[in-house]
Image (cartoon, rainbow, N blue to C red):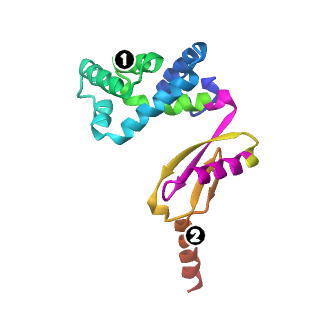
């Protein structure tokens, strides 16, 4: 499965594939994904946790102790916790974000979903997210998982990347087009 999907390759792909196969056997694919999402949110929200994960200065032992405290606080247990501890013991915790991304890709493929990368200027409410999912589902014929990134520099509108297709309806791009057209006219 990993060889078919370019987003699931290398060290992170091998770890994600192993985790996915184990989770599938245990019928805990969604529970593991939820735990990994929770861990990723904590990682994105804490500079100290990012430093712990990425820095080679910390020993495997000190990383493991700190990780145990983080997992306990987050309530992450079972297969997900064991997996994160294995990454730590094997000195591969620095790759956790890539492993999570690869795991998500495997889950999406397993469920017949496609993932769209969406960039917006500010957080969308649930109604708008549902409308966007519905619109993308009508185009693809599949359920669409959204990977939403907030980038205020696009000013407004949105940028949607789905597979090899990209639609950029951001205000920034429209302003740049107008600026370019005015330069050519002048």
* Most foreground residue, 167 or 122: 122
The residue carrying mark 2 is 174
* Most foreground residue, 78 or 136: 78
| Residue 172 image offset from top left, x and y in percent | 52, 67
Question: On the picture, is 179 further left or further right than 136?
Answer: left
Residue drawn 40% across the image and 21% down it:
84
Residue stretch rendered in magenta on the structure:
108-137
| Residue 50 image offset from top left, x and y in percent | 32, 36
Circle 2 Cα neighbour tier, 10 Å, few/some/many (<14 / 14–19 / ≥20): some
Q: Is residue 163 magenta?
A: no
Residue drawn 37% across the image and 28% down it:
74
* Most foreground residue, 43 or 5: 43
Q: Is residue 122 magenta?
A: yes
| Residue 166 image offset from top left, x and y in percent | 63, 53
Q: In the picture shown, does residue 109 fall above or below 78? A: below
| Residue 99 image offset from top left, x and y in percent | 48, 28
* Most foreground residue, 184 or 168: 168
């Amino acid at each position: 499965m990993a060889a078919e999907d370019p987003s699931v390759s290398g060290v992170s792909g091998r770890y994600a594939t192993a985790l996915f196969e184990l989770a599938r056997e245990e019928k805990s694919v969604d529970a593991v994904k939820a735990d990994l999402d929770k861990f990723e949110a904590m990682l994105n929200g804490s500079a100290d946790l990012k430093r712990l994960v990425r820095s080679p200065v910390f020993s495997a032992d000190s990383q493991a102790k700190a990780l145990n405290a983080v997992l306990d606080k987050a309530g992450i247990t079972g297969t997900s916790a064991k997996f994160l501890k294995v990454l730590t013991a094997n000195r591969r915790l620095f790759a956790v974000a890539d492993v999570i991304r690869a795991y998500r890709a495997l889950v999406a493929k397993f469920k017949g979903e496609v993932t769209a990368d969406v960039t917006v200027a500010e957080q969308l409410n649930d109604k708008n997210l549902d409308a966007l999912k519905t619109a993308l589902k009508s185009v693809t014929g599949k359920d669409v998982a959204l990977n939403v990134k907030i980038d205020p520099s696009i000013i407004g509108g949105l940028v949607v990347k789905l597979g090899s297709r990209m639609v950029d309806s951001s205000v920034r791009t429209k302003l740049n087009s107008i600026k370019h057209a005015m330069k050519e006219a002048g």
